[in-house]
Amino acid sequence: MKDEVLSFDLAKTIARMRAAGTDLQSCEVKSAVGKLPKDLAESISAFSNGSGGTIVLGLSEEEGFKPASGFDPKRTQDALAEVCANKLAPAIRPSIDIETFEEAPILIASIPELPPRDKPCHVTTKGTYEGSFIRTGDGDRKLSHYEIDRLIEERSQPRHDARIVEGATEEDLDDALVEALVERERFLHPRVFEKFGKRDILKALRVLDEDERGILRPTLAGLLALGIYPQKYFPRLTVSFAAYPGTTKATLAETGQRFLDSGDFVGPIPVMIAEAVAAVAKNTRTGSFFEGAFREDVPDYPQEAVREAVANALMHRDYSPEAWGTQVQVNLYADRLEILNPGGLYGSVTVDTLGTLGLSSSRNEFLSKILGSTPYPQTPGKARYVVENKGSGYAEIASRLAAAYMEPPKPHDRPGSFSLTLCKRRPTLGKQHDYSSGNIENAILAMATEYDTVSAKEVEEASRLSRGTVLKHINNLIRQGLLEATEPGSSRKKRYRLTRPQ
């Protein structure tokens, strides 16, 4: 059974590469006839520094991924094991199997992703900064010095957020935010803080710290969370927002505009979060579906999910001096929302463990603690804080999206950056609906009104009716003169819109 699964996976992978005419992000093919390719160690480094991958030896890419004549699997297996053990640091322990493909022997090596504490893996003869690679598309590229520094930094707890801000004073802090923080901490930890003065609490939380002359000054964490205008000292530690008309940054609107809207949000972290959430809401729509006899309004992106995503980006981003010139980006496209921040996932958290209850690692431990007691702008009289610090942020995002009948969030982690993508809500008719003829046709018209155009596939997915039944209702609406096709004949791009007045 195991051999059947391996052969099926191999056949499927080779078919994909033959169709694409090139290697894949997760699979590298080499003929390896006579000897191992010189750059094979780089590919192993690249896979181990990323999400792992597979190396297939004994196939010729030049000949359409066919078995390479003269390939010696046993000698190649020994040579590959030698490279992994002695020419890479740290050593890699792949799973290596000899399989048969199209009646010829090939070698399949499964390269595991290294734990964060062991990255980066580098080619020993080239050293760490010249011999560390990462997989990009169908090839390997050298990791930048910045990316390598971030990987090495994970071997110990960073302290960039505890850095004293030269020239800043207590007057740079917002009095209202400071008072709210102190009150909250006294409430949470009365036995510890009931006899502490305000300054002592701020020093204990590392909002303030003494410089080399004994002068109390805000730390980077304190200034970012509670400052009046942190950008006075860090002009690029902001949130940038851009709404694009299409699905790429290169797409222009009909008017020739590159952006439908854009902004650069400044101030302390709670203010930047609130402004980013408002910008997304301003540039998206709120649709509706019917739950039984009741209408429920659902935005393209739930505000709580957006808020959590932006808060996580600002809390977990890299605050090393090398990243002070890099903003958190909130990019809104026609089909998705992307939130990007410098600095990949930190510590024991990986893409696979994101959202796991209780699992959390803080690159910026002082900032995280402060934000847990920093009030977030909202309706007066309701107590709310920027983060919960329970490792629940990603789970909250996923939960909010699921409640709105949306796809799960899509994380993408790199050594020097992290992004989270929220796919735009698709048209939906609700979980329970009376699909009588008039009702389904009214729903189709409502979808065409809300989204300008609608496809048969979208109606099929939203209603869970068969394609034939959906087309029957669409054709009936066309006969009534209520709906018209956007494309002629059997075009795959055909969509339907409300009939335009003649």
Image: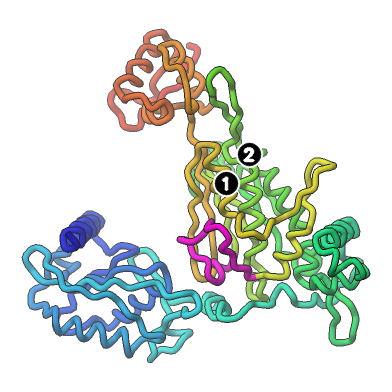
- Disc 2 is placed on an element classified as loop
Separation (CA) of disc 2 from disc 1: 8 Å
Q: Quadrant of the rendered structure where residue 301 is? A: top right
Which residue is labeled 1 in the image? 332
Depth check: 375 or 416 in front? 375
Residue 354 among those drawn in magenta: yes
Taking depth in this image into account, of 4 and 401 the one nearest to the observer is: 4
- Residue at position x 49%, y 49% from top? 248
Are the two marked residues, 2 and 1, in contact with CB atoms closer than 8 angstroms? yes
Q: Which residues are magenta?
A: 342-363
Taking the image as shown, residue 384 lies to the left or right of residue 451, namely right
On screen, residue 117 above or below 264: below
> Toward which corner of the image does residue 196 lie, by quadrant?
bottom right
Image vertical order of residue 226 relative to residue 499, above or below: below
Q: Secondary structure at mark 1?
A: strand
Q: Nearer the viewer, residue 259 or 435?
A: 435
Q: Answer above or below: position of 285 versus 58.
A: above
> x and y percent of residue 284 in the render?
61, 37
Kind of residue at disc 2: Asn
Q: Residue furthest top?
A: 480
Is residue 12 rendered magenta in the image? no
> Whole-percent x and y of residue 449?
52, 22
Please tell me which of labels 2 and 1 falls first in the chain: 2
Q: Is residue 273 left or right of residue 341?
A: right
Q: Amino acid at mark 1?
A: Leu
Q: Which mark is residue 269?
A: none
Residue position for label 2: 283
Q: Residues within 10 Å of mark 1 (few under 14, many from 20)?
A: many
Residue 229 visible in the current orientation:
no
Residue 369 placement (x, y as % from top left)? 73, 65
Residue at the image position 78 percent from the left and 57 percent from the top: 374
